[in-house]
Image (cartoon, rainbow, N blue to C red):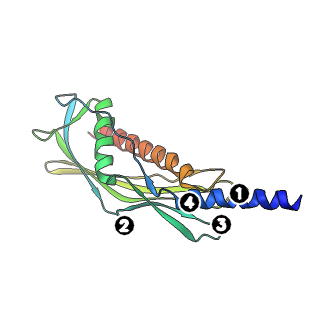
Amino acid sequence: MKKIFSLFFATVVAVIFSACAAKTTIDLPAQNSVKSGILGRNISLSVSDLRDDKITIGVLKNSDGDITSRVSTSSALEVWMKNALTAELAKRDIAVVDETPDFSVNVNIDKFQSEIFGIGTKNMHANSQITIIANFGDRSVKKTLNEPVISFAPLPTLKSLEPFVIETLSELASRCAAEIASIN
């Protein structure tokens, strides 16, 4: 019985360590192409990543809270976010254009960090902050979105963190597009 338990425990530890030591890059999904042209409104859009560490998007931590792996994305977050926002805005009848926009929008990624740690309830966290600045010539509107998200994964590995991060970023892009669409 002790041998079976020891073998089982060793297998579980090996699976966790191999999963943690494996791939440490999250592949963000490609965005659907958006037809360019005149929609209901036209805006110019810029996205800037203002985080100190533009490479790290998340961390894996052990049950003591020590970082065991840093996680990055396969593409720059600001490029992915601009593409995601362009697609989400098109769903809301807003086109991203280079010439003759109705107004310009600057989106700043102030914070995005995700983590997964330990085995237990609510072991995945993501915190983000996005600032939206819309400029209408002499008038400016500023909005800030905060997106704290908590979830659970049965095993604290990148395989669990990846869909959580993708879903969190997709929801953040959707909320950001809704805020931009509500600006008059």
Q: Quadrant of residue 184?
A: top left
Q: Are marks 1 and 3 in contact (CB under 8 Å)?
A: no
Which badge, 3 or 4, is on the more N-terminal residue? 4
Mark 1 packing: few (<14 Cα in 10 Å), some, or many (20+)? few
Q: In the rendered structure, which amino acid carries the disc numbered 3?
A: Ser
Q: Which SS class for mark 1? A: helix
Measure the C-alpha gap from mark 3 to mark 2: 24 Å
Q: Quadrant of residue 20?
A: bottom right
Mark 3 packing: few (<14 Cα in 10 Å), some, or many (20+)? some
Q: Residue at x 34, y 53 (%)?
A: 77
Q: In the rendered structure, which amino acid carries the disc numbered 2?
A: Asp
Measure the C-alpha gap from mark 4 to mark 2: 21 Å
Q: Which mark is residue 11?
A: 1
- In the picture of the structure, the residue carrying the numbered disc 4 is 20
103 left or right of 171 in image: left
Between disc 4 and disc 1, the foreground one is 1
Q: Are marks 4 and 2 in contact (CB under 8 Å)?
A: no
Which badge, 3 or 2, is on the more N-terminal residue? 2
